[in-house]
């Protein structure tokens, strides 16, 4: 008999969304809200695309005026809003990916599904950037371009080893040489998908108390590692990638406590205030992930009316992948006349078109493989 690594607690310990109905009925909780919406809240779909678009708008400033100007603007009042974008992205991912992990019931299936979701679209974007975009905008000869070591190194992005430069590309842009700035988060995303299964192996899914203890231990470990390396938890222009890892784990902890955690607007407002107060400072940023996670889940469990655009696909990953190269190209094309509003106005619709391509031509077809992978589960989930 084929062995499978089961991560799911025995049936009598099961606290899944559907199994939590009785316990959640007495007061509105995160779990009861999910049940009320039949597991299909539109809030998460709107959040994904809005957060991706917000990153594009924010990057427009840096691509138009340079990284130093963008970092300086981070300390303005607008930075209070901008600083929560990536933490919310990672919290959202941690919450939803934990649900995926729970449905998979074995780690091999989970990791295979994550690879199917992340890798194909990333590979296509990297190849398009290197083979098409770079060849068009490079300032060196095509012979030099296609034989450069830098050209071949760029393909390491497909495995999460990030390389930002292509030979002769964007040399005169305010943000010089960088082809796809957004890829800096890829190694930390991959780290999330490694750390969570490791925690599961040592008991993360067995007990809420253990889940919380592991999260606290990871927070202390990250604090210690950054302190020893001399790195700040709040470097210029955002938060450290390891803080984003903690945000992912905070989303997973909220998922584990979903049938006990109240779902309440006042609590969300208080969490939002605490998130903003703690994210900005190096000594308090490590307290922020759990507050950001609660706000993220609260907003995700809103249920605004769905539109055709939202129902037709998940375009947030495509926006994330293609926005930065397109914005750099807009800056390159418009030259000294560029400004952040012009950059955003031109880049946003172009990015949406590429996101549509990415979803319908790459991501959705590959997700069709999911049903074959899921056949490897030990038993189906209702």
Image (spheres, rainbow, N blue to C red):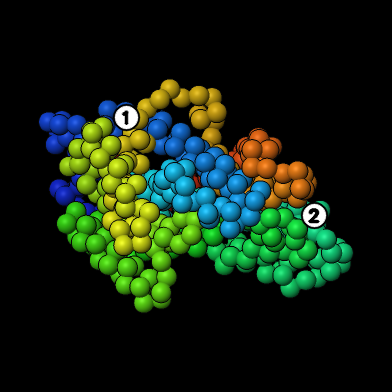
67 sits left or right of 232 in the view: right
| Residue 16: % across, % down | 24, 43
Q: Nearer the viewer, residue 148 or 347?
A: 347
Residue at 57% in and 67% down = 161
Q: Which residue is mark 2?
A: 137
The residues bearing labels 2 and 1 have C-alpha atoms spaced at a distance of: 49 Å
Q: Nearer the viewer, residue 10 or 170?
A: 170
25 sits left or right of 129 in the view: left
Tag 2: Cα neighbours inside 10 Å, few (<14), some, or many (≥20)? some
Element type where label 2 sits in the image? helix
Q: Which residue is mark 1?
A: 38
Q: Earlier in the sequence, mark 2 or mark 1?
A: 1
Observer-side mark, 2 or 1, equals 2
| Residue 294: % across, % down | 29, 43
Q: Report the disc number at residue 175.
A: none
> Which quadrant: the C terminus?
top left
| Residue 99: % across, % down | 34, 46
> Which quadrant: the N terminus?
bottom left
220 sits left or right of 104 in the view: left
């Amino acid at each position: 008999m084929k062995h499978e690594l089961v991560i799911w607690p025995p049936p009598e310990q099961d606290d899944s969304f559907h199994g939590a109905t009785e316990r959640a009925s007495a007061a509105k909780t995160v779990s009861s809200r999910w049940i009320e919406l039949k597991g299909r809240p539109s809030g998460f779909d709107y959040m994904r695309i809005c957060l991706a678009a917000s990153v594009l708008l924010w990057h427009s400033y840096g691509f138009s005026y340079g990284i130093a100007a963008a970092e300086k603007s981070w300390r303005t009042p607008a930075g209070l809003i901008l600083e929560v974008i990536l933490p919310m992205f990672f919290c959202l991912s941690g919450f939803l990916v934990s649900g995926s992990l729970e449905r998979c019931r074995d780690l091999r299936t989970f990791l295979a599904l994550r690879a199917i979701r992340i890798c194909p679209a990333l590979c296509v974007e990297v190849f398009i950037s290197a083979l098409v975009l770079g060849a068009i905008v490079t300032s060196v000869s095509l012979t030099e371009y296609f034989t450069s070591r830098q050209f071949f190194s760029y393909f390491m992005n497909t495995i999460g080893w990030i390389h930002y430069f292509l030979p002769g590309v964007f040399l005169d842009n305010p943000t010089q040489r960088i082809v796809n700035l957004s890829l800096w988060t890829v190694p930390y995303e991959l780290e999330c998908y490694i750390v969570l299964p490791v925690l599961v192996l040592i008991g993360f899914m067995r007990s809420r108390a253990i889940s919380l203890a592991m999260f606290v231990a990871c927070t202390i470990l990250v604090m210690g590692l950054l302190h020893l390396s001399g790195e700040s938890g709040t470097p210029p222009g955002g938060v450290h990638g390891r803080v984003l890892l903690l945000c992912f784990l905070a989303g997973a902890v909220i998922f584990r406590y979903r049938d006990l955690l109240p779902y309440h607007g006042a609590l969300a407002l208080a969490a939002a205030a605490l998130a903003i107060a703690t994210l900005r400072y190096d000594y308090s940023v490590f307290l922020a992930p759990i507050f950001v996670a609660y706000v993220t889940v609260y907003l995700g469990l809103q249920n605004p009316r769905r539109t055709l655009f939202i129902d037709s696909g998940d375009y947030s990953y495509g926006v994330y992948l293609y926005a930065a190269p397109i914005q750099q190209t807009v800056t390159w094309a418009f030259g000294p006349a560029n400004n952040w509003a012009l950059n955003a106005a031109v880049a946003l619709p172009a990015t949406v078109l590429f996101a549509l391509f990415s979803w319908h031509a790459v991501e959705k077809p590959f997700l069709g493989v999911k049903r074959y992978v899921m056949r490897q589960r030990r038993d189906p989930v209702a």
